[in-house]
């Protein structure tokens, strides 16, 4: 059994190659029934030179209880520099690292 699970790699990818530099700052939060909402990644500020993808910084957040819950929700909180021209479908690539007791 794993003792701890933390976010390790978080990437946002524009599905239609529209640059994501319209995003000023962004946070990824996780929640589950009976558990408080928790920030698991952020990028503040998003570089003005961001292209069609960028990596977020993982927060030092233990998420094992959230991932073991019957259901959990992920939510983005973000602030923009300007409105993008058109619809921007975005893919989230999210990886976690598990640690065992030694």
Image (cartoon, grey):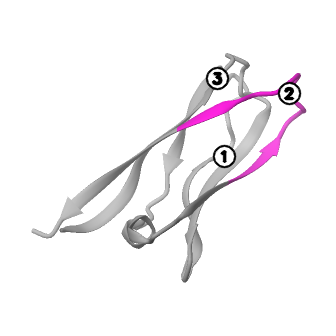
Q: Quadrant for the N terminus, please.
A: bottom left
Q: Which residue is mark 2?
A: 84
Q: Position of residue 44 (x, y in %)?
A: 66, 46
**Which of the pair 54/72 is nearer the observer?**
72
CA distance for labels 2 and 1:
19 Å
Above or below for 30 versus 51: below
Secondary-structure class at tag 3: loop
- Relative side of 24 to 60, left or right: right
Q: Earlier in the sequence, mark 2 or mark 1?
A: 1
Q: Position of residue 91 (x, y in %)?
A: 59, 33
Give the magenta-colored segment's residue range: 76-92
- Say whether residue 89 is magenta: yes
CA distance for labels 1 and 3:
22 Å
Q: Earlier in the sequence, mark 1 or mark 3?
A: 3
Residue furthest out toward the bottom: 34
**Which of the pair 27/64 is nearer the observer?**
64
- Say whether residue 2 is magenta: no
As drawn, the label of residue 44 is 1
Above or below for 79 versus 59: above
Q: Position of residue 36 (x, y in %)?
A: 58, 78
Q: Confirm or deny contact between disc 2 and disc 1 (CB under 8 A).
A: no
Q: Quadrant of residue 54?
A: top right
Q: Quadrant for the C terminus, please.
A: bottom left
Secondary-structure class at tag 1: loop
Above or below for 30 versus 18: below
Q: Earlier in the sequence, mark 2 or mark 3?
A: 3
Q: Which residue is mark 3?
A: 15
Residue furthest out toward the left: 102
Identify the residue shown where x is 73% and y is 19%.
Answer: 18
Identify the residue shown where x is 72% and y is 21%.
Answer: 19
Q: Position of residue 17 (x, y in %)?
A: 67, 16
């Amino acid at each position: 059994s794993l003792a701890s699970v933390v976010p390790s790699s978080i990437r946002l990818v524009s599905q239609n190659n529209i640059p994501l530099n319209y995003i000023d700052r962004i946070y990824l939060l996780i929640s589950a029934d009976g558990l408080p909402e928790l920030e698991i990644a952020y990028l503040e500020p998003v570089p003005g030179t961001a292209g069609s993808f960028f990596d977020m910084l993982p927060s030092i957040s233990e998420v094992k209880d959230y991932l073991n819950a019957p259901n959990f929700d992920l939510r983005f909180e973000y602030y923009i520099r300007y409105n993008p021209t058109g619809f921007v479908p975005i893919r989230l690539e999210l990886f976690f690292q598990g640690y065992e007791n030694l």
